[in-house]
Image (cartoon, rainbow, N blue to C red):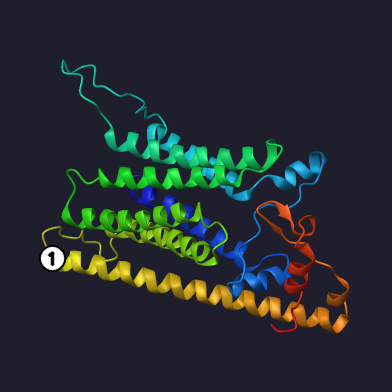
């Protein structure tokens, strides 16, 4: 990770995860359900009905889980064996009589990436192999991965310049906020504020890593940033604050488009008369509404879409 591509690749990965969250929460396939999400009345669905057979199994394979496994595994291996011919899979310098540890940065990065890959495997296991999806297991796994990232970042600043430490300190800050959101989400899994906060924070982490690659390794001026210049450290903070504003603006535009998309869809269905003939079943915590005693009353309330 201590290279230009080593910051670009995780930056793109985190941004793609944030974008995936935003699209999932905004452009839900159920028009009425998505409008409730956008209005803050309901959280995204987490336990859809499973389809039997091999085709049903493939449809259950989570895109997020596959992305985490592929990226986490590839990034972990690249830390030890990239560029080709390099082998850093060694803990000790056996040529030194004191046997000191070597390649500490690479081993820290490998540990961090491995936890994200493990989180992906937990997603796949929960959604495809277990008789019932364990959403809590998935949430705990991704929370642990971000906690490990925050812990590693906290001890990743030794021997670095002031500018690089400032970059990593701000990254540690945003990662810690993600940890906080994911922890609260364990007890409030259907809070839309938490889902959208996570989306924004993960996207900020991605764009900041992308920008950090240019600050540390390829500055546009062609001149490296001087660590002893306090103005450089101040502008690092300025840039980070701009990333917050730009990502918030991007999410606002994304959810505005999603809202308009669903409004147009509802209007088209009303004109065709399909909406009033369709009965929608929502799932909360894996339990179908119609399977509970209070289901009828809740369905009536959820299907009152004329007030939107």
Mark 1 neighbour class, 10 Å CA radius: few under 14, some 14 to 19, many 20 or more:
few
Q: Would you place residue 65 above or below residue 280 in this image?
A: above
Q: Can residue 2 be seen in this view?
A: no
At x 48%, y 59%, the residue is: 15
Please state the horizontal and vertical placement of residue 65, each as a whole percent of the image: 58, 45
Quarter placement of the N terminus: top left
At x 52%, y 55%, the residue is: 17
Please state the horizontal and vertical placement of residue 94, each as a whole percent of the image: 24, 17
**Left or right placement of residue 182 versus residue 31 in this view:** left
Residues 109 and 181: in front is: 181
Q: Would you place residue 67 above or below residue 203 in this image?
A: above
Please state the horizontal and vertical placement of residue 263, each as a whole percent of the image: 70, 80
Q: How many numbered markers are drawn? A: 1
Q: In which quarter of the view is residue 155 placed? A: top left
- The residue indicated by pointer 1 is 230
Quarter placement of the C terminus: bottom right
Residues 217 and 285: in front is: 285
At x 66%, y 58%, the residue is: 45
**Left or right placement of residue 175 versus residue 292 in this view:** left
Q: Can residue 136 be seen in this view?
A: yes
Residues 286 and 38: in front is: 286
Q: What element carries label 1?
A: helix
């Amino acid at each position: 990770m201590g290279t230009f591509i080593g910051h670009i690749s995780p930056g793109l990965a985190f941004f793609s995860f944030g974008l995936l969250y935003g699209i999932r929460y905004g452009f839900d396939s159920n028009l009425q359900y998505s409008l409730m999400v956008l209005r803050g009345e309901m959280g995204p669905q987490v336990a859809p009905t499973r389809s039997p057979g091999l085709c049903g199994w493939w449809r259950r394979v989570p895109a997020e889980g596959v992305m985490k496994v592929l990226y986490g595994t590839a990034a972990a291996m690249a830390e030890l064996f990239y560029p080709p011919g390099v082998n850093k899979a060694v803990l000790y310098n056996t040529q030194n009589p004191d046997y000191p540890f070597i390649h500490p940065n690479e081993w820290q990065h490998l540990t961090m990436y491995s936890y994200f890959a493990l989180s992906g495997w937990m997603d796949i296991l929960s959604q495809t192999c277990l008789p019932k999806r364990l959403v809590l297991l998935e949430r705990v796994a991704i929370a642990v991965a971000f906690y490990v990232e925050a812990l590693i970042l906290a001890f990743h600043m030794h021997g670095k310049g002031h500018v690089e430490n400032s970059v990593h300190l701000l990254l540690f800050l945003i990662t810690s906020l993600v940890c906080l959101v994911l922890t609260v989400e364990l007890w409030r899994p259907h809070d839309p504020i938490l889902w959208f906060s996570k989306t924004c924070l993960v996207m900020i982490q991605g764009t900041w890593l992308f920008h950090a690659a240019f600050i540390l390794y390829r500055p546009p001026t062609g001149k490296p940033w001087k660590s002893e210049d306090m103005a450089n450290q101040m502008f690092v903070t300025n840039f980070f604050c701009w990333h917050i504003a730009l990502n918030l603006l991007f999410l606002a535009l994304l959810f505005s488009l999603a809202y308009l998309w669903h409004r147009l869809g509802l209007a088209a269905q009303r004109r065709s008369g399909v909406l009033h003939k369709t009965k929608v079943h929502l799932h909360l915590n894996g339990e179908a509404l119609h399977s509970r005693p209070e289901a009828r009353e809740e369905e009536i309330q959820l299907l009152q879409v004329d007030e939107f």
